[in-house]
Image (cartoon, rainbow, N blue to C red):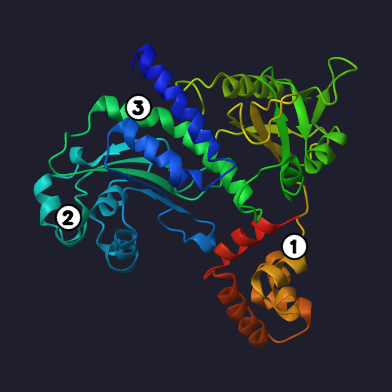
Amino acid sequence: MMLTNRELARQSKLLELIYTGMTAQSRWTTDILPAIADYLQVSSCVLFTPFLKPQESGFLYTHGISPQQVQLYKDHYRNEDIYAKVALSRGLLVEGSVIIFADILPAEQLHASKYYREYLVREDMAQLMSAIVFGPDSDSGMPLTVCSLWRGINADPYTEQERTRLSLLIPHISRALGASQIIRTSAMNSISSLSALDRLPSSGVLMVDESGKVIFANRAAQRILNTQDGLRLRKQSDADEFGELIAEDAQADKALRAALRTTLSHNSCITPHFSKSIVVPRSSATCNYTVQFSALVLDNELSAEERRFAAIVFISDSAKKLHIDPEILQSSYGLTPTEVRVAIALFESCSAKEVAKTLGTSHHTVRGHIKLLYTKLGVDTRARFIKLLLGIAL
């Protein structure tokens, strides 16, 4: 799709706004979704994780939809959602895709449904276009995430041009959300200082300037890079504090450089999805590093006159043994010392039976403790329990 200069300028401004959501999640509701709605000429929109609640590291950001409508969906109409049923039955939840439901759901079938007659008509939410930001089995590790845009029954139908416009936004939304989720699961609502980046427990973080040079590395990143086990920093001059990120493996190094160039270009047509991370082999051949990139607006809250950060780089070390801080579980979730021991043992074990053996107590007692700690943590399955603890792991 060829864009006019005016369209390109408008899109560029929107992309800058999207990246502000990376370091300040509140802006998805206050600024970003309203701008997306205006850009695509829709009356309301929602960006959410359909199968996860906030306490399970899910999120729900809305624009143009009343709180009462949101609550009605949660309480009474989630199971009546004919759009979701059609998408699931036809296997349409493909990462990066955009669905115009009028193409696959006849108006007669929609209007005859209980979901439309009792729920959607309340706020004239009739025409739906949805972007699958993260698929059900995303390589990024992110949960299923959908951006849904609504128009009224008498509004103009969605066009292929609008589908293309939304699809060009998806990689940028994915990058901002992916980085935002790393911050969110580290028990912070935003990052507003470099010291906050140092507190990110399980991710190495590099800040990069417009030339691609690393000008900040948090403690976790410095620990990884100081080992020089597949990744390192190369100084171009004695004046450099850090230098450029280098992979020892030639193919991985080439991929790193290409990914960084693309991230810094802000080109909406070539920016890859957040799940398209770079795998860097360790020289010791034990495990790999995973490297992900996200652009930053140049006037972000972390930049100063002498330091202008253009991109953020996350490095994950699959060989790093994760540690759960007992104090976080006690202070943040109100677990008792016994429940903390059970939680940590369960995180490191495969079953309640193994926990009982580790702690020298009965299987029945352990199951009782697990039930209580699940309630306090706001989870209902082992998978969600593990996901929550991964977010606070050191």
The quadrant of the rendering that contains the N terminus is top left
Mark-to-mark CA distance, 2 and 3: 27 Å
Q: Earlier in the sequence, mark 1 or mark 2?
A: 2
Q: Earlier in the sequence, mark 2 or mark 3?
A: 2
> Splitting the image into 4 quarters, where does residue 150 fall?
top left
Q: Left of 12 or right of it: where is 316?
A: right
Mark yes or no: residue 197 visible: yes
Task: Between residue 174 and residue 123, name the one nearer to us.
Answer: 123
The quadrant of the rendering that contains the C terminus is bottom right
Disc 2 marks a residue whose amino acid type is: Val
> Splitting the image into 4 quarters, where does residue 305 fall?
top right
Say which residue label 1 marks.
Answer: 324
**In the depicted structure, whether residue 369 falls above or below residue 229:** below
Picture coordinates of residue 75, whole percent (x, y) = 32, 68
Instruction: Report the residue at 72% width, 38% height from top.
Output: 205
Indicate which disc residue 121 carries.
Answer: 2
Mark-to-mark CA distance, 1 and 2: 48 Å
